[in-house]
Each structure stands twice: as C-alpha cells, then as structure tokens.
Amino acid sequence: MSIFDFLTRKDINEGVREFECTTGSVLVDVRTREEYDRGHIEKSVNMPLDRLEAITGKVEDKNTPVFVYCLSGARSGQAERILRRLGYKDVRNIGGISSYRGKVVR
C-alpha cells in the first residue's frame, strides 16, 4: 500500500466482477438502510457503517473475502479499516455505487 493510494479512484464495476468471481465472498453495502432501499447492488447485504461490528455474527470466518462499498468510497474506506481491526484478513474497498454501471435492485 502506497501513500498515494488515496489518489487512485476505485472502479466499483471491476470490484463487483471480482466479487462475482470470488467463491464464498460477501458483498457489503455500508450505507444507511434508507440509502440501501433506494437502490443497491444485487447480492449485497446492508450493514451500515455505524453498526458494522455486528458483522461478526453474520460472517464468522475472518478469512472470508469481504467486498465493501458505499456511495462514493469514503465510508467503505472506513469500513475496510474497521473490518481489518476486527481481524478480517481479506477486505476490499471497491468504491462507490455512484459510478456503478450495472443493474441496481430497489
């Protein structure tokens, strides 16, 4: 990880493709319930950032690949740090749904 990583914008479209190709992975939307209900990526689970620590009850194996996204990528960056602190080994911030070009579920 470089100090310049913050300059590189995450491509959520590539991140979703990676999620779909990763066996046993979990896609987590860390936006609020209201934001999630307005539209989310298929197969994602809603785990708002302020309640993210509850993920340990849903994803018990800390080796499970976890892909996180939000609206712009900022909250998912925070979520990545929280999940790593909780002991999850394979966490990927894939950015924000605002630049997602795929189907959105309502």
Image (tube, helix red, strand yellow):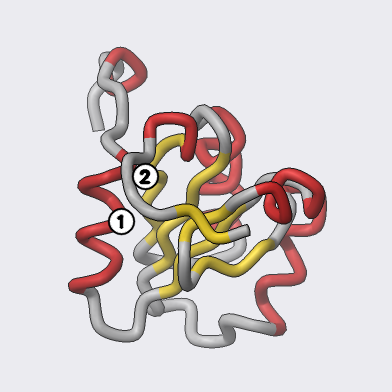
Residue at coordinates 47% horizontally, 66% vertically from top-left? 42
Indicate which disc, 2 or 1, sits on the residue closer to the N terminus. 1
The image quadrant of residue 65 is: bottom left
Q: Residue at x 69, y 48 (%)?
A: 38
Q: Tag 1's secondary structure? A: helix
Q: Split into 4 quadrants, where in the image is the C terminus?
A: bottom right
Number of numbered markers: 2
Residue 25: percent from left, percent from top: 36, 76
- Label disc, if present, on residue 94 of the rendered structure: 2
Location of the N terminus (image quadrant): top left
Q: Nearer the viewer, residue 71 or 104?
A: 104
Please indicate whether residue 7 sits to the left or right of residue 53 in the image. left
Residue 67, percent across and down?
41, 59
Residue receiving disc 1: 16
| Rendering coords of residue 104 (x, y %) | 48, 53
- Residue 58 lies, in percent from the top left, at 65, 83
State the residue in front, 44 or 37: 37
Q: Residue at x 67, y 63 (%)?
A: 46
Q: Of the residues shown, which amino acid type is indicated by label 1? A: Val
